[in-house]
Image: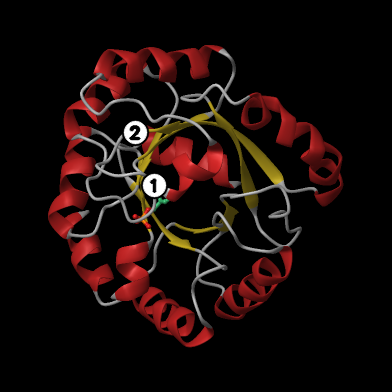
C-alpha cells in the first residue's frame, strides 16, 4: 500500500494515525538519533520531514539517517520548493488554501512540477490551512498570509470543503510549529463533518491531553514535532492514548 492508501484504509477502519515531524533545519544528529531510537521501540505510522528553512543538503542528510533506521514511511512536508528528495516515500503537495498568496496556491507548484514528476515520488495534493494559535507563527510570517481566526469554525469548514471540491486529497489543519495553542477541538469536529477526505491536524500538540483532544475530535492523522524532538520519551504517553 502506498501512503495515501494507508491513510484511507485507516480512516475506513476508524484508526487514527500518528506522524512524527522532523525538521532537518533544526534537529541535530544526536537529537535525531535519540528520537529514532524511541520510535524503534514504539513504531509510528509516518515520519514527516520538512521545515521553513531546511536546505536540500540538510534534507538529504536527515533522510540518510532515517533510512538507516527504516522506521516508518517518510513523507516530505515541504517548507519550500527545494525540499524534494527521491528517497522519500511521498510528498504532500501543499496549497495554502487559508491564504491568498498566489505563489503558495500555484507558483511554487509550477517551479516544482517537473522535478516532482522525475522524482517518481507519490504526490499527495493537500489543502493546507493555518489556524490562529495565539501568536505569530513561522509559517504565517514566512507565507505572508493571515491564519483563520480560531473561533471561526464556519470559515474553516467552508475553506476545507472548497479544498476537497477542488480535488485535494487531504486537508491539513495547522496551528503552526510550536504553537501556543493547538487547533481547537470544536473546529476539528466541524471541519470533519463537512469532509469526505482525511483530515490531518498538527501544531502545538505537546501533551497526551492535547493529543487526546485532537483524536476525540476526529483527526485522522495527528502530527507532533517540537514536543518529541525535545522529549522523545513523550512518545510512549502519546501512543498509550491511541488504542
Ligand atoms: C508543524 O504541525 C506541525 O508544522 C507540528 O507542530 O512542532 O508544534 O508539534 P509542532
- Would you say 83 lies left or right of 191 here? right
Residue at 25 percent across and 19 percent down: it is 152
Q: Measured along the vertical axis of the image, is residue 79 above or below residue 28?
A: above
Label 1 to label 2: alpha-carbon separation: 10 Å
- The quarter holding residue 38 reads bottom left
Pick out the residue farthest to the left. 209
- The quarter holding residue 175 reads top left
- Judged from the image, the secondary structure of the residue bearing numbered disc 1 is loop
Quadrant the C terminus occupies:
bottom left
Whether residue 124 is visible, yes or no, is: yes
Q: Measured along the vertical axis of the image, is residue 18 above or below residue 135?
A: below
In-front residue for pair 181/214: 181
- Judged from the image, the secondary structure of the residue bearing numbered disc 2 is loop
- Would you say 241 lies left or right of 109 here? left
Whether residue 1 is visible, yes or no, is: no
- The quarter holding residue 50 reads bottom right
Residue at 39 percent across and 53 percent down: it is 177
Q: Which residue is mark 2?
A: 131
| Other-residue count near label 1 (Cα within 10 Å), few / some / many at <14 / 14–19 / ≥20 | many
Q: Which residue is mark 1?
A: 137
Q: Position of residue 69 (x, y in %)?
A: 55, 79
In-front residue for pair 95/13: 95
Q: Position of residue 52 (x, y in %)?
A: 55, 54
Residue at 57 percent across and 53 percent down: it is 75
Question: What's the colour scheme?
Answer: secondary structure
Nearer-N-terminus badge (1/2): 2
Q: Position of residue 178 (x, y in %)?
A: 33, 56
Pick out the residue farthest to the bottom. 30
Residue at 40 percent across and 84 percent down: it is 34
Marks counted in the figure total 2
Q: Would you say the residues marked 1 and 2 are in contact, meaning their CB atoms lie under 8 Å apart?
A: no
Amino acid at each position: 500500500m502506498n501512503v495515501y492508501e494507508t491513510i484511507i484504509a485507516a480512516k475506513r477502519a476508524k484508526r487514527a494515525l500518528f506522524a512524527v515531524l522532523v525538521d532537518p533545519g533544526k534537529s541535530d544528529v544526536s537529537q535525531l538519533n535519540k528520537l529514532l531510537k524511541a520510535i524503534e521501540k514504539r513504531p509510528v505510522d509516518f515520519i514527516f520531514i520538512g521545515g521553513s528553512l531546511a536546505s536540500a543538503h540538510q534534507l538529504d542528510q536527515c533522510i540518510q539517517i532515517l533510512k538507516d533506521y527504516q522506521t516508518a514511511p517518510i513523507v516530505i512536508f515541504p517548507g519550500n520548493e527545494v525540499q524534494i528528495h527521491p528517497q522519500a516515500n511521498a510528498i504532500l503537495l501543499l496549497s495554502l488554501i487559508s491564504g491568498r498568496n498566489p505563489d503558495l496556491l500555484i507558483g511554487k507548484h509550477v517551479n516544482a512540477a517537473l522535478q516532482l514528476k522525475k522524482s517518481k515520488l507519490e504526490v499527495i495534493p493537500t489543502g493546507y490551512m493555518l489556524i490562529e494559535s495565539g501568536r505569530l507563527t513561522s509559517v504565517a510570517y514566512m507565507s505572508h498570509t493571515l491564519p483563520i481566526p480560531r473561533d471561526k469554525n464556519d470559515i474553516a469548514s467552508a475553506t476545507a470543503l472548497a479544498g476537497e471540491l477542488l480535488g485535494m486529497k487531504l486537508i491539513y489543519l495547522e496551528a503552526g510549529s510550536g504553537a501556543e495553542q493547538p487547533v481547537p477541538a470544536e473546529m476539528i469536529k466541524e471541519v470533519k463533518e463537512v469532509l469526505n477526505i482525511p483530515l490531518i491536524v498538527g501544531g502545538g500538540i505537546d501533551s497526551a491531553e492535547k493529543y487526546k483532544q485532537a483524536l476525540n475530535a476526529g483527526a485522522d492523522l495527528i502530527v507532533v514535532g517540537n514536543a518529541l524532538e525535545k522529549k522523545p520519551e513523550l512518545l510512549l504517553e502519546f501512543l498509550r492514548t491511541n488504542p
